[in-house]
Image (spheres, helix red, strand yellow):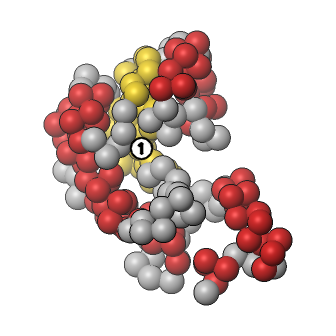
């Protein structure tokens, strides 16, 4: 099976890519980092270097694929103070939607989060709810599986100084 995988060689995607290749699948790994190209290819995958915000790139990369593993990449809340993460989520999920339909992909795995079924009360995790709703508009002949892990604690490392200085995650608690 030909599978397009987003998330470069991150904490979830890296082991996934290795497992898929070991199972005999042809894997295309989407990464925004040119420096990851060699590592991707050394694993035996094809590297597709580009941005998820580039709808044309995503459509070309999904062309000829049988399945897609999709995720919304982590947001840079510290580097971009003007970030509208909800708008960015809808943009990327919309590009996935278009690329999946245009390529005729019938199997989609979406890395989401616990709480994604709730339209309110999840704080910043609302972006998973938004993305799931976009994927939910795909035609009924497209199988979409949402994976909802409870947490990725290593994502909290970016907030280490805030927690040490304030004793809590200030941005999430107010």
Q: Is residue 116 visible?
A: no
Q: Position of residue 27 (x, y in %)?
A: 45, 22
Q: Position of residue 2 (x, y in %)?
A: 37, 22
In this image, 151 relative to 137: left or right? right
- Name the residue that disc number 1 marks: 70
Q: Residue at x 37, y 60 (%)?
A: 89
Q: Residue at x 33, y 52 (%)?
A: 92
Q: Please, is residue 145 above or below residue 107 in the view?
A: below
Quadrant where the C terminus lies? bottom right
In this image, 174 relative to 136: left or right? right
Q: Residue at x 68, y 58 (%)?
A: 158
Q: Position of residue 49 (x, y in %)?
A: 40, 28
Q: Please, is residue 90 above or below residue 164 in the view?
A: above
Q: Position of residue 108 (x, y in %)?
A: 36, 42
Q: Residue at x 42, y 31 (%)?
A: 30
**SS at mark 1?**
strand
In this image, 126 relative to 161: left or right? left
Q: Please, is residue 76 above or below residue 169 in the view?
A: above
The quarter holding residue 161 reads: bottom right
The quarter holding residue 39 reads: top right
Q: Is residue 70 visible?
A: yes
């Amino acid at each position: 099976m030909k599978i397009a995988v987003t998330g470069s060689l991150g904490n979830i995607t890296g082991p996934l890519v290795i497992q898929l290749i070991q199972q005999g699948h042809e894997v295309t790994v989407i990464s925004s980092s040119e420096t990851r190209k060699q590592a991707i290819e050394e694993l035996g995958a094809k590297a597709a270097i580009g941005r998820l915000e580039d709808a044309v790139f995503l459509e070309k990369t999904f062309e000829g694929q049988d399945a897609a593993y999709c995720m919304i990449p982590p947001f840079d809340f510290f580097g971009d103070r003007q970030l509208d993460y909800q708008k960015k989520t809808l943009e990327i999920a919309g590009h996935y939607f278009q690329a999946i339909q245009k390529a005729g992909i019938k199997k989609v795995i979406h890395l989401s989060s616990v709480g994604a079924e709730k339209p309110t009360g999840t704080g910043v995790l609302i972006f998973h709810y938004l993305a799931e709703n976009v994927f939910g508009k795909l035609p009924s002949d497209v199988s979409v599986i949402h994976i909802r892990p409870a947490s990725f604690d290593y994502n909290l490392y970016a907030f280490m100084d805030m927690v040490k200085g304030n004793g809590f995650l200030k941005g999430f608690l107010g």
